[in-house]
Image (cartoon, rainbow, N blue to C red):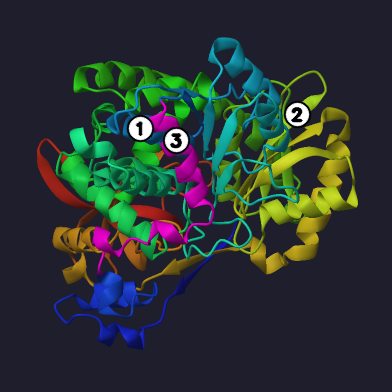
């Protein structure tokens, strides 16, 4: 994959921000749309009003009736981090409202698949028939499952954020900022945010009817650590509302006021809570939580998040750590197989023959890990990737990841329209989606998908652009600058963490952990020495005799033996003569 470093310009709006901020920080923020003091305000009082969500009054009516009549509410979640946090939050808050007649159920991704299916409704009823089903992070596409639940006399409240299909389910209430007619400004809300707002509206109604006359009304802000985790883990754009949520959640984690489950996962990940960042949520906490849904049963992850004390949470977090290690091993084997197949294009020196829309499949691949595989290959080759795994005798499931400029869900919709019946079902977002096809239709799908990619992208789109916030002189390469950048966050999707570029001379280099490059560098214009690390370097092509390197990097804090030092976290590097 080729990459090009482009520098963001000096933004004239930087002068509108407070002068007590360093010039570097002001320019970074202004280049991300922060051009007024109000956009710097990340107080929880700035959160959007739940009353703007279409369907929230109907949802509150059903749920408040269930609480006052002590009806059994079954929360139906999803098997990823957003679904797990949504499920945990719903159950914990309903319990704190004084309603203990609550259960939860997450479909087995290997048997029932995603969402509230007819089979899942029947499975629930065979155990204990619910009076109300509350879906979290799913439901907007569960037309048949909701119809079946309604036929059994079960009320259904859908809370979701995924894009609706052509047919909307006949639920008793639907709360989804992306449904037609919803005026809620943040279309980027994750599933956990949506149900958080529903709980806030429900609390207001319960206060109004006197429910808390002899009870203590909970402070829902105590659950923002879960919502922050979901927001980062689901890689939704960090608009202003989402930035408030992540900022507030991180503040609670850093101050030690977070769920015991999150604290326990941080411990097994060897992360310091007081220095937590959004990146830590995305790369340390979320993978360990997701490992439960990928390798086993997400109920184990939900149980960890709902743990009432740290001792119980630590036991469950250890289980998640073991599952994550298993996931890493499986993923590594799958990635090796995929790269071995892809190496044929390097060997024949014909990278142009590589499909633009890349589909990968192996009969032995693990269904729970194909999403990570697709992400890894997309990062290496910078093109839309779909990784498939066997899911039944004649069914294969795919997990898709995209690049900027290519809307994955819309592309699958176009393939489905052109080739009726080829895709059995699909759903998702612009950057990620899932689908099922018959294995006999795989070759036809490969050609149809690649054709759509060729129609919508250009050759230049396949070259990755690394957007840099410029270079830093040696006096700016400090631990204080790293901390100032951290505190100016949170950073995430569509509000990227600052990245810089420059030319450095290599004083020393060595391999650590078999595939990571540890460097000691000197800036092109300076004499100071700086530590740097580049993870997952392709050592087959990296020249170990290079004296100079051009690279893009982020400022990071590295703690070793109690000493915190600046470390340059290298994202892209190319050797220079």
Question: Is residue 267 visible to the viewer in this orientation of the structure?
Answer: yes
Residue to which mark 2 is pinned: 396
Precedes in sequence: disc 1 or disc 3: 3
Residue 530 image position (x, y, % from top left): 22, 56
Residue 212 image position (x, y, % from top left): 24, 38
Q: CA gap, disc 2 to disc 3?
A: 42 Å
Classify residue 400 by image quadrant: top right
Q: Are marks 2 and 1 in contact (CB under 8 Å)?
A: no
Q: Could you say which is closer to the camera, residue 392 or residue 121?
A: 121
Q: Give the SS element for disc 1.
A: helix
Classify residue 491 by image quadrant: bottom left
Residue drawn at (58%, 21%), measured in percent from left and top? Answer: 108
Residue drawn at (37%, 35%), measured in percent from left and top? Answer: 89
Q: Could you say which is closer to the camera, residue 137 or residue 540?
A: 137
Q: Is residue 351 above or below residue 102?
A: below
The magenta segment is 41-69
Q: Give the SS element for disc 2.
A: strand
Q: CA gap, disc 1 to disc 3?
A: 13 Å
Residue to which mark 3 is pinned: 65
Residue to which mark 1 is pinned: 94
Residue 533 lies within the magenta run = no
Q: Are marks 2 and 3 in contact (CB under 8 Å)?
A: no
Crowdedness near tag 2: few (<14), some (14–19) or many (≥20) residues, C-alpha within 10 Å: many
Residue 40 image position (x, y, % from top left): 26, 70
């Amino acid at each position: 994959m080729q990459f090009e470093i482009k520098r963001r310009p000096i933004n004239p709006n930087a002068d509108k921000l407070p002068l007590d901020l360093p010039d570097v920080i002001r320019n970074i923020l202004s280049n991300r749309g922060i051009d007024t003091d109000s956009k710097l305000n990340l107080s929880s009082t700035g959160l959007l009003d739940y009353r703007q969500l279409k369907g929230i009054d109907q949802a509150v009516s059903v749920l408040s009736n269930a609480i006052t009549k002590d009806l059994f509410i079954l929360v139906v979640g999803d098997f990823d981090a957003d679904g797990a946090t949504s499920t945990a939050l719903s159950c914990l808050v309903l319990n704190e409202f004084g309603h203990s007649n609550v259960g939860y159920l997450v479909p087995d991704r290997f048997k029932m698949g995603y969402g509230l299916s007819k089979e899942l409704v029947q499975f629930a009823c065979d155990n204990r028939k619910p009076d109300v089903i509350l879906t979290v992070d799913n439901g907007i596409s569960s037309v048949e499952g909701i119809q079946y639940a309604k036929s059994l006399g079960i009320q259904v409240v859908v809370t979701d954020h995924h894009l609706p299909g052509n047919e909307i389910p006949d639920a008793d209430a639907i709360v989804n900022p992306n449904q037609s007619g919803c005026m809620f400004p943040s279309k980027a809300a994750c599933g956990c945010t949506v149900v958080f707002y529903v709980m806030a509206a429900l609390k207001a109604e319960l206060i109004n009817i006197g429910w808390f006359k002899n009870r203590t009304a909970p402070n829902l802000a105590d659950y923002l650590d879960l919502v922050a985790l979901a927001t980062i883990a689901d890689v939704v754009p960090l608009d202003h509302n989402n930035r408030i949520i992540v900022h507030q959640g991180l503040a609670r984690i850093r101050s030690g006021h977070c769920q015991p489950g999150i604290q326990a996962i941080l411990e097994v990940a060897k992360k310091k809570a007081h220095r937590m960042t959004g990146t830590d949520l995305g790369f340390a906490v979320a993978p360990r939580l997701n490992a439960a849904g990928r390798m086993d049963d997400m109920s184990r992850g939900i149980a960890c998040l709902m743990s009432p004390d740290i001792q119980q949470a630590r036991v469950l977090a250890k289980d998640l750590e073991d599952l994550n290690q298993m996931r890493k091993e499986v993923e590594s084997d799958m990635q090796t197989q995929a790269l071995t197949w892809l190496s044929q294009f390097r060997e024949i020196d014909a990278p142009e023959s590589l499909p633009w829309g890349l589909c990968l499949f192996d009969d032995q691949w693990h269904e729970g890990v194909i999403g990570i595989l697709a992400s890894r290959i997309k990062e290496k080759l910078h093109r839309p990737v779909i990784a498939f795994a066997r899911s039944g005798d004649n069914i294969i499931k795919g997990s898709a990841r995209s690049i900027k400029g290519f809307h994955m869900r819309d592309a699958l919709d176009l393939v489905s329209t052109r080739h009726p019946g080829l895709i059995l079902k699909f759903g998702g977002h612009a950057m990620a989606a899932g689908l099922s096809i018959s294995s006999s239709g795989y070759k036809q799908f490969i050609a149809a998908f690649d054709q759509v990619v060729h129609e919508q992208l250009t050759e230049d789109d396949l070259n990755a652009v690394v957007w840099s916030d410029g270079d830093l002189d040696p006096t700016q390469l400090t631990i204080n600058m790293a901390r100032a950048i951290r505190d100016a966050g949170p950073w995430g999707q569509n509000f990227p963490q600052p990245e810089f570029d420059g030319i450095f001379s290599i004083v020393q280099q060595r391999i650590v952990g078999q595939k990571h490059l540890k460097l000691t560098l000197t800036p092109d214009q300076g004499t100071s020495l700086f530590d740097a690390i580049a993870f997952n370097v392709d050592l087959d092509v990296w020249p170990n005799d290079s004296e100079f390197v051009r690279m893009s990097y982020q400022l990071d804090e590295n703690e070793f033996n109690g000493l915190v030092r600046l470390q340059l976290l290298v994202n892209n590097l190319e050797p220079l003569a």
